[in-house]
Amino acid sequence: MASFHTNHAHPSAAGQSRVVPRLDKRRAWVIPHSTSRRSGTPAEHAAAAASARGGGGRMQTSVAANLSRGAASTFAPSTSRRSPQQTTAVLRGGASRPTPLRAQRVASAKATRDAPATDAAAASDDEVKHAEEFGLQAAELAHLRPLRDALLAAHDDLARKQSVVDADARVVAFVAGGGPVARVLTNIDTEDAFLLKCVVAVGQAHILDVASQDPITVANALAPLVRTMRHVDVFYDMLGGVVGYQLTALELIHEQYGGPPPAPIAPRHGPDHPAADACGDAADDANYETDAQGNRGLASTCLRMDTDARVRMHVPVGPDLRENAGAFAARAAAWGLEELPRMAEVYPLGGAGDRLGLVDPGTGESLPAALLMYNGRTLIEGLLRDLTAREWLYYKLHGKQHVTPVAIMTSAAKGNHRRISALMRSHGWFGRGAGGFRLFEQPLVPVVTTHAGRWVPNGELNLALKPGGHGAIWKLMHDQGVFTWLAAKGRTGGVVRQITNPMAGTDTTLLALSGVGAKGDKALGFASCERHLGAAEGVNVLVEKQDARTRTWSYGISNVEYTVLQQHGISDEPVAPGSDESAFPANTNVLYIGLRKVQDALLSSPKGAFPGMLVNLSKPAAVNGMRGGRLETSMQNIADVLMRSSHGSPLEASTWQDLPTFVLYTLRRRVTSSAKKKRDPATLNLAQTPDGSFLDLLKNASDLLDRCGVTHPAPEGGTVQDYLDHGPGFIFCTLPAIGPLWDVIEQKIAGGVLADRAEVRLEVAELQWENVRVDGSLLVEAKAPLGGACLGAADGIEESGAVLVFDDAACGRCRLRDVEVANLGVDWSAPGNVVWSAQLSRHESCEITLHGDAELDAKGVRLEGNLRYSVPSGWRLKLRPDGKGGVAEAWTHLATAAVDADAAAAETAAAAAEREVRGCGGGSRDRAIGGRGSQERALVGPTWQWRYEMGEGSRVKLHLEARAGVAVHGRSYAEAQAAVEHAHAHAHAHAHTGEVRRTHTHTQASPREHTPEEKETAAEGAEVGGGVGVARRSVRVTQQQRKGITGGAPSTSR
């Protein structure tokens, strides 16, 4: 496995545990474990819990995320700061089991003695209720464990599993009772009957209460419940289906009441499995056992690392994209660009927009967060624009287009899947083709309460259901063939982004993340950053486990959720006294995944298939106030089965960057700024709100403009209150494909000024900006910013699957040099303004609309007042000073100008050749637009364009190539159009009379048909799909361009 050595000092065994100076000298948290197990009867547990309760806390726990699971422990940080010579501080000796979270709800003994009698009585009642629930949970677990084990032993044999549930005492009593549901069990599908019996076996017969006695009515009414149970049974098959789901959830609840940790389930692999190292002493074949059916797997004792382990948590070691003026960032981004043809994108979109206040005005139903209109477009479109920008960068450098496949996990909750599917269809799959996406639906799972795991009814034959967390994504990708689909497209790695984080596509972040992951053949990578104290987000840690029994050390980067930090012994303390930055960095849920390695990991064990299992009991689950939750998982905790093991001795700290998992650091607002919840008008807290996210976007824009030499106001426009009341100091937003790397953008934008409250929106990829001053609003939009056409039904692809074919000779382009824009701009006092959503009222603006391959070239002019420039496809509008303080227009028909230039060049070359024959000397002139070389035919269409190449230090270098002496056909569009039509008519007449044969040669591609060269060029773009290369087209003359009437009506208005 490759390692990455940046220019900064590499950590040594006795040195720092992270390379970033400002994150150095942090605490290492050590969790020693006792090997003793909790013992005693359920009644004794209940009595102990009733007498041991104290203080408050959120009732939540974790399995895979809890790196100390399965042992009694006391958590405490080291008592001294790390120095450069000390990476950890070790707590020696044994420890006792921590006080249960539930037991922390009552005050200390002294406070209880001093409290009034009524408070003491209330506390006593609470203890009695707690003890009662504890006993019921213990009894239910005793019933479920053997049932789950028998079902797992039956594997996929439905007949055997049916026999197991038929023998359950609850099922026997239910069938004997002869109720409406019991009577139809023999008349419905065998698997359906099995699932309903599982509902009974897990103690939920009350869900099957039904008023009707009619067998047909009852059977039909059961269908939705059966469908839900089938989803649960299939998805949680490695836990034991419906029964395993219920048992696991109740075990986690019971642990919070003071019960023992959940018992592990043996992984389904042998000692040679790729994921075996994650399970401790996997090389020891003695740890494997074979059941009666010949199925071989790890014995439960193999998982004793969780119970015998001492766990240290370090600040993760990893490169920082900010270091050395971004030198490593540029190199890593270049790696990522090389790997783009082998990369995929994965989006978990299951979240509903409840906290954002997103509702369907017609039904009142919550809308998915993906539909939030952020900066003028939905969040899902924003993610896809970022992806397209990286593909465009690859195309500009290599001349080939690759369409990255995108896997999207939706949810059955609140119509999420239906609405996301409808959105994708209505937008034509965003020019990526229906075949470029795979949507798969996350199942809903029952809510389990603290009262013996009772499910919450929600109407007849219905129950309360919730999504099971984004950790479901890996197993769903396996179960629904997504991994296979991606492999068939030649994809080996992927980037995972959450829908509510629009910031991760900034500059080098995603390319560098995928580059480091792919270059090092990593299994999983985290994009991380600084974390604010008290932030409601998880932390990244480097886990070091020591198993004293096997003398095995295991290492890996992982995540600890903020809700369980204290359970892991991590105090949310500052990195330095007085700092507002936390000691451990933030987990952003922006991930790199090695597809094959992640798939192997999830198949290795239930811990891999259901990473980070927890039940959050912080909220009431029933109308009577009873608490409960569903079994949730966290996608990032797949890391916990991707650890590297060392037998006999620990790994040197200098090798910690060579683990299967890695972390990559960058500035927080370059990688995350979520838009998860609606801002509370009563506070100035912008965290996780669209308002705060958009402000971070503008802060990034501020940093970019500084690099470009553009003067601008502060993004906030004053205080946070000023920002909320009066808008930001400026708005500067661009099409991601203008870069997306800032190294590229700063070569396209150079110099200028944004006045206070100026607004600039540049929806164009081909742009040259030099010394532009904007006081007001400047809105530039290319309708075809990446050129090309969509291949759809006519090309054998269904209409909804149309794919945009890149063509940098056919995209809109804009040159602004020494231009001043002055207008009244945004009406910042308008009551309907929503800045972060781009819902703005404007007094005036300068709008430039470029249709198709239209061009606008403005130089040395002042564009004042309310202006609208709309340039049709195939035309160029040049704006220059008229010498009287105004602006003069010059219109050029691009195709005609190109043909004329080609004819003139041919004549010049012929004359030069004739002179050479006569001995007069001289040479032919260069007829190409630029970097393609003097042997290349003059390009039809663009009069200028950017050429990309990879330069020194892995930084992309741009060269602007411009055609000299572009013809002008008129001082207005009407005049130019008339001149072009007259020229075409004249040439056509000469061609038919035979008077001007040379003119006929240069006008043969008339409106009647395309030339063979044009047809061949168009055919080159027909092969577009996942990973199929598309050659760049350099010649494109259409009928409509020659007529000069495409792309909408031209307009120039004030």
Image (cartoon, rainbow, N blue to C red):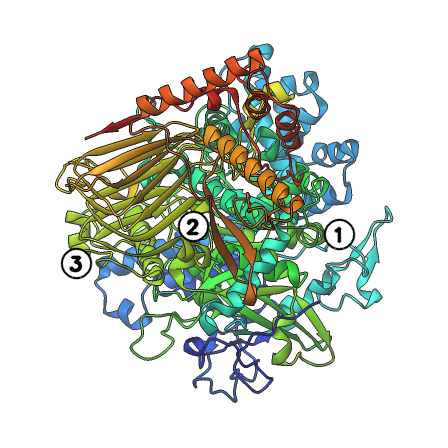
Query: In the rendering, at what x and y percent does residue 962 appear?
Result: 46, 46
In the picture of the structure, the residue carrying the numbered disc 3 is 718
First of labels 2, 1 by sequence position:
1
In the displayed structure, 77 sits above or below 857; it is below
State which quadrant residue 308 falls in: bottom right
In the displayed structure, 310 sits above or below 857; it is below
Give the structural element (helix, strand or loop) at label 2. Answer: loop
Inspect this view and state whether residue 213 appears. Answer: yes
Amino acid marked by disc 1: Arg
Left or right of 287 in this view: 178:
left
Q: Residue furthest bottom?
A: 85
Badge 3 crowding class, 10 Å Cα cut-off, few under 14, some 14 to 19, many 20 or more, is some
Q: Nearer the viewer, mark 1 or mark 3?
A: 3
In the picture of the structure, the residue carrying the numbered disc 1 is 268
In contact (CB < 8 Å): disc 1 and disc 3: no
Query: In the rendering, at what x and y percent does residue 413 appear?
Result: 47, 33
**Residue at image location 60% in from the left, 32% down from the top:** 229
Q: Nearer the viewer, mark 2 or mark 3?
A: 3
